[in-house]
Every structure is written in structure tokens, then in C-alpha cells.
Image (cartoon, grey):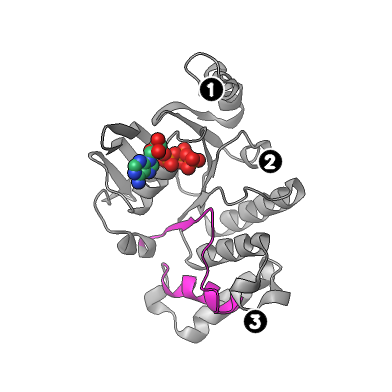
Amino acid sequence: MTLLQLDNVTKRFGGLVAVDGVSLEIDTGQFVGIVGPNGSGKTTLFNLISGVFFPEEGHILFEDTDITRMPPFKRAPLGIGRTFQIPRPFSSETVRENIAVGAMFGRMGKELSVDASMEVADQLIERLDLTAHRDKAAGTLTPIEKKMLEIGRALAMKPKILLMDEAMAGMHPSDIDQMVAFLKQIAGEENIALVAMVEHIMRAVLGMAEKVIVLHQGAKLVDAPTQEALNDPRVVEVYLGGAGGK
Ligand SMILES: Nc1ncnc2c1ncn2[C@@H]1O[C@H](COP(=O)(O)OP(=O)(O)OP(=O)(O)O)[C@@H](O)[C@H]1O
């Protein structure tokens, strides 16, 4: 079933077309990789889906609701979650409190008491192996631990779709494998569509994706099952910097 649909979406910054007539569909529970070199429009695309920007043209549908011009704070309770490349937790609050805040502002927010939100946080802390850090101030965590916290905060929102903004950049390959396996497992259990944005062809991440969408200069270049997309000569050309590549 289609969860998210973009129909001919364009976003300009002055004369620059950052996202150029992109149409795409993401299904319930699907794992999708969004790939593209620096400046190809990945972040702008995420900003359009999460409501940071509105497009000049086109429509965005989430479960048949037109969210094209819906403010971001109304999208999170619908089930649109996001992690940021540079996590900015509430530094003086604990890991537990930061994750609980995710639960309070997420899809279940209205129904959850503070105690229930803390319980959601505790379950995720255990699954993310952050137990030893539970009561530490988030500001004292290492960058990798902050990324885990960021993923925990986003999962606590009980999203139907989780947009991951280079969530695994800078991680050790074995940590990436572990993180992707964890995300796949929890996404399978909770039927979450995962959309992972990566700048480079990261096989560790994309190897587990069902399909890959490649952006180039704001436009969609390829949208195909993973192996097909990665072997596509146009993708190879973009990444090797051949004619038309960057
Ligand atoms: N707020 C903004 N104002 C003006 N131009 C912007 C803005 N945000 C992005 N751009 C431009 O839009 C284009 C697409 O940028 P975007 O950040 O979406 O690409 P990206 O693929 O995410 O790259 P990166 O990996 O560097 O973030 C770039 O040329 C960028 O300079």
C-alpha cells in the first residue's frame, strides 16, 4: 500500500531548482535508499516531506491526506518521523528524558502520560544498548551515542515513516551493519517505512534497501530495485563524475 506519494514536486531557491519535478512512492513498511552526490537535493526533499519547506509546484500525499502545505508540527503526529545528521538533543536532560520527549510529541503523544512516555523510552534504551547511559545528560554522550539517542528519540515517536538524514555517516562499518539490522528488525515489527539518505553508495545501508532512488541535480535519475539501481550505468556515471556527473 502506498504510504507517501510525491507528485511532480519542485522546490526553488531563487533561480536554483533544488528539487526538480520529483515524483515517487514509498509503500508501508518499505526500506528505501535515497542516494545522490552533494547538492543533489536529498536534504531539500526530506525538508519538503517533513514540512520545513513547502514546494512551489506539485503535491505530497501521506496516506491519502494532502500534506503539501501542512506545518511540520502537524506532520509528526500523523507518523512522519525524522532523524537529523547532526543530532541536537536537549543537552542537560538525560538520555531517558530526551527519548521520552520523542514519545510525547509523536503519534501516540495525546494518549501517553509522562510515566508511559518514560516506559517507551526505557524499552528503546534497552534495545539500543544505551542502558549504561540512561541517566546521563545527553550532552555528555559521544557523537556515536548521540546518533543512537537520535534514532531512539525518532523511534519513540512511533512513526509510520522514518526519514534518516545520513543517520549512519561517520559510523564504523560494523556499527552500521548492526544499526541497519536493528532498524530493519524494529521496522519489520512495527511496520515502519525506512527512508535512508546517503551521499555515497554505502553498500552496507543500500544492501538492505528494497529500492533505491538516485537524485542528480534535483531530479530523479533512477528509481528501481536496489541491485538494478546500483548497476545502472547512469548511476555509475554520476558517481564517477563522467559526462553530466558532478
Ligand atoms: N535554504 C536554502 N537556500 C538556498 N539554497 C539552498 C537551500 N537549501 C539547499 N539549497 C541548495 O539546493 C541544492 C540542493 O541542496 P541539498 O542540501 O538539498 O542537497 P543534498 O543532496 O542534501 O546535499 P548535501 O549532502 O550537501 O546536504 C544545493 O545547490 C543547495 O546549495
SS assignment at label 1: helix
What segment carries the magenta color?
78-106
Give the labeled residue for mark 2. Answer: 204
Q: Is residue 173 left or right of residue 36?
A: right
Q: For disc 3, does the CB lie below 8 Å from ligand 1?
A: no
SS assignment at label 3: loop
1 or 2: tag closer to the N-terminus: 2
Q: What amino acid is labelled 1 in the image?
A: Val
Residue 184: x, y in percent?
A: 62, 51
Q: What crowding class fits label 2: few (fewer than 14 Cα within 10 Å), some (14-19), or many (20 or more)?
A: some
Q: Is residue 5 visible?
A: no
**Which residue appears farthest toward the top when viewing the image?**
243
Q: Marks 3/1: CA distance?
A: 46 Å
SS assignment at label 2: helix
Residue at 41% x, 47% y is 46
The quadrant of the picture showing ligand 1 is top left
Give the labeled residue for mark 3. Answer: 135
Give the labeled residue for mark 1. Answer: 238
Residue at 62% x, 54% y is 183
Q: Is residue 82 magenta?
A: yes
Asked if residue 91 is positioned above or below residue 45 in the image, the reply reads below
> In this orientation, which residue lies closer to the viewer: 46 or 191?
46
Asked if residue 228 is positioned above or below residue 75 in the image, the reply reads above
Residue 87: x, y in percent?
A: 54, 61
Q: Is residue 147 left or right of residue 80?
A: right
Q: Is residue 164 left or right of residue 126?
A: left
Q: What amino acid is labelled 3 in the image?
A: Asp
- Quadrant position of residue 95: bottom right
Q: Marks 2/3: CA distance?
A: 32 Å
